[in-house]
Image (cartoon, rainbow, N blue to C red):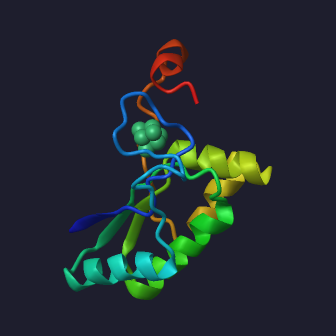
């Protein structure tokens, strides 16, 4: 297996105290790739014989389940057959909350639309009192 990370956006609703990556949409250096930008990265990965693409991004407040589905379709168009490893539990929870869709349904739709495996990212801190300190949002 050959893996490549693909960063879609660094705009993030959480802005954790320790994070040097996440930005507000209006901050210097904030970015969010469109279809062309995502497909360009996916094509580059495909050309390198990458077999798994991992979408690693901020938790963009404007993204919905539909956004995630579109991104997977764009990647599969540009890199057919590649395994998509993506969507942190926080992104899944965000899509569920924003769309008023039960979480299991969000996961089932993502799988139907091309998700290979889900990330563990952002679910490492399981103690609420600790999360409250490092990532209150
Ligand atoms: S959720 Fe992730 S990307 Fe967003 S601020 Fe926290 S560590 Fe950074």
For image coordinates 48% across by 17% down, the residue present is 133
Q: State the residue in front, 40 or 4.
A: 40
Position of 28 with respect to 107 (left or right) is left
Most distant residue in the right direction: 100
Compared to 15, does 76 lie above or below? below
Pinpoint residue 79: horizontal percent, then vertical percent: 37, 83
Position of 11 with respect to 104 (left or right) is left
Pinpoint residue 49: horizontal percent, then vertical percent: 21, 80
Is residue 95 at least partly visible in the picture? yes
Q: Quadrant of the C terminus?
A: top right
Compared to 3, does 19 lie above or below? above
Pinpoint residue 23: horizontal percent, then vertical percent: 46, 46
Position of 84 with respect to 114 (left or right) is left
For image coordinates 70% across by 49% down, the residue present is 96
Ligand 1: quadrant of the figure? top left
Q: How many marks?
A: 0
């Amino acid at each position: 297996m050959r893996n490549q990370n693909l960063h879609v956006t660094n705009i993030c609703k959480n802005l954790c105290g320790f994070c040097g990556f996440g930005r507000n949409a209006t901050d210097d250096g904030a970015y969010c790739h469109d279809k062309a930008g995502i497909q360009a990265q996916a094509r580059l990965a495909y050309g390198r014989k990458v077999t798994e693409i991992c979408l690693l991004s901020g938790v963009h407040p404007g993204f919905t389940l539909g956004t995630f589905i579109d991104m997977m379709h764009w990647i599969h168009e540009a890199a057919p057959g590649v395994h998509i490893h993506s969507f942190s539990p926080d992104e899944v929870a965000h899509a569920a909350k924003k769309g008023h869709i039960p979480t299991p349904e969000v996961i089932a739709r993502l799988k139907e639309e091309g998700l290979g495996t889900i990330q563990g990212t952002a679910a490492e801190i399981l103690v609420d009192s600790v999360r409250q300190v490092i990532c209150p949002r």
